[in-house]
Structures are given as C-alpha cells and as structure tokens.
Image: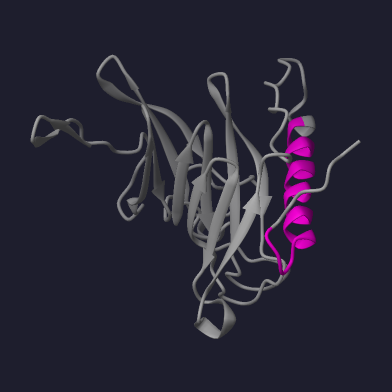
Amino acid sequence: VFRRDGVNWVEEALLTGSDGDSGDGFGNAVAISNDRLLIGAYAHQGGCPLGADCGGAAFVFHLEGGSWVEEAKLMAPFNERAHYFGYSVDLESGLAYVGSMASVNGYFEAGASYLFRQVGGSWWQVLKLTAFDPNTQNWFGSAASLSGDTLAVGSYRSEGAAGSVYMHALAECLSPPIPPPIPTASSWGIVALTVLLGVAGTLLTRRAAGQFPQPSSHD
C-alpha cells in the first residue's frame, strides 16, 4: 500500500492474507474505498470443503490507527462451486463486489458475481448475480465496477468471445440493510436467508434481459 506524501508516493504497508499460502494469487485484484481495501486471492483454498472446485477468497482490510488490519475474509457459500472466487473485486460505500468463474446451470465457468454488505462490524452476502443467458466459459464477472446504486459486470468471452457488459440497478434490492444475526439463530436460518436473497438477485437479472435493469417495486 502506498500513500501520497506531498509529491511522493511512500510505501505504507505490505499486506498478506492471515491464512495465505503459496499459489493463492493474493493481490490479483484490488479495490480501495476510503479507509478500506478489498483484495482478491482467486486460488486460495483455506476453509473450502470442496477443494479446488470452490477455490478463492477476498480479504477486507481496514485502516485503524495508521495500520491496515484484516477485517474479514469473504468466501462463496460453503456448498457452491465458485471457481476462482476473487478473480475481480470492487468496493464502495459499504458494498463489496466479488466475481468468480462459477459454473451456472451446468455451464462450466459461466461466471457469477457476489455482493456483500457491511452491517456493523461484519460483512454479509446479500446478492448473487448471474447472466440471464449463461454459457460455457463466458466468464461473467471477469471485471466489474460499482458506482452508487449501479453495478456493471463484464463478461469478456460472451457473444462469441466478442464480450459484453451487464448493467444492474441495485438500489431497491439492497434496501433495507440486512440486520445482524440474532445470537441464538441457527446456522441453517442464516444459510436460508442467504439463499433467498441470492435467488432474488438472480431473478432481478433475468427480468431485465435486454435492457438496463429497473427492479420492480414491492408492496
């Protein structure tokens, strides 16, 4: 990490993942927003029960008292084969985006995107997005950019390898914020909530096929 000091850029910190290992690819993607950093490690294997089929992680660092401290390690849900999770990342206003080369509906490396929201001192997955027209090795999520309530997701091998960009409007589907879990809640309840929100994000993408997405209002 470098910080500008007058006309010079001064090295401030050298960061690594808390459980990093050789070949993790830590630093393959980086995003910064105010006092937080999001760093992808697309080949990381730590904590994944499926081995190489769900490799990858993204690490959140927070600047505290002049030092960068690891705040969270983001991963795909434990039962998903999110290959290369952390291949792309972005960060803005309490939202963290992580792209992966996950297989979708039987299409190998079609790609999927995950959004995490900061609630208090924790980060929770609130959306999973896939293309409405997934195909083998389209790599949806190979690049992305967050700006306000808009998310642009690149899929550079789609359209016969010509590439395309999918636009998503996030304002409605991310409001209100997801509350912190109740201490006595079962882990299955938390998993169910994550799955339901992921389905909502996927339906939003499919509904908006062929146009700039405008989420419908909910009574």
Numbered range of the magenta stretch: 190-212
- Reply yes or no: does residue 198 show up in magenta: yes
- Where 25 sits versus 142, above or below? above
Of residue 75 and residue 96, the one placed in the foreground of this image is 96
Residue 77 occupies quadrant: top right
User: Residue 179, how many percent across, how many down?
Assistant: 70, 22
> Of residues 122 and 55, which is closer to you in this image?
122
Question: What is the x, y in percent for residue 205?
Answer: 72, 58
Number of labels in the image equals 0
Tell me if residue 79 can be seen. Answer: no
The one of 42 and 188 positioned closer to us in this rendering: 42
| Residue that lies at the very extreme toward the bottom in this rendered image | 160
Query: In the picture shown, does residue 40 fall above or below 136?
Result: above
Instruction: Decide if residue 127 is on the left or right side of residue 25.
Output: right
Magenta stretch secondary structure, dominant: helix
Q: x, y percentage for residue 127? A: 67, 44
Q: Is residue 161 left or right of residue 18?
A: right
Which quarter of the image is occupied by the C terminus? top right
Residue 146 image position (x, y, % from top left):
51, 47
Which residue sits at x=71%, y=15%? 183
Q: Is residue 190 in view from this perspective?
A: yes
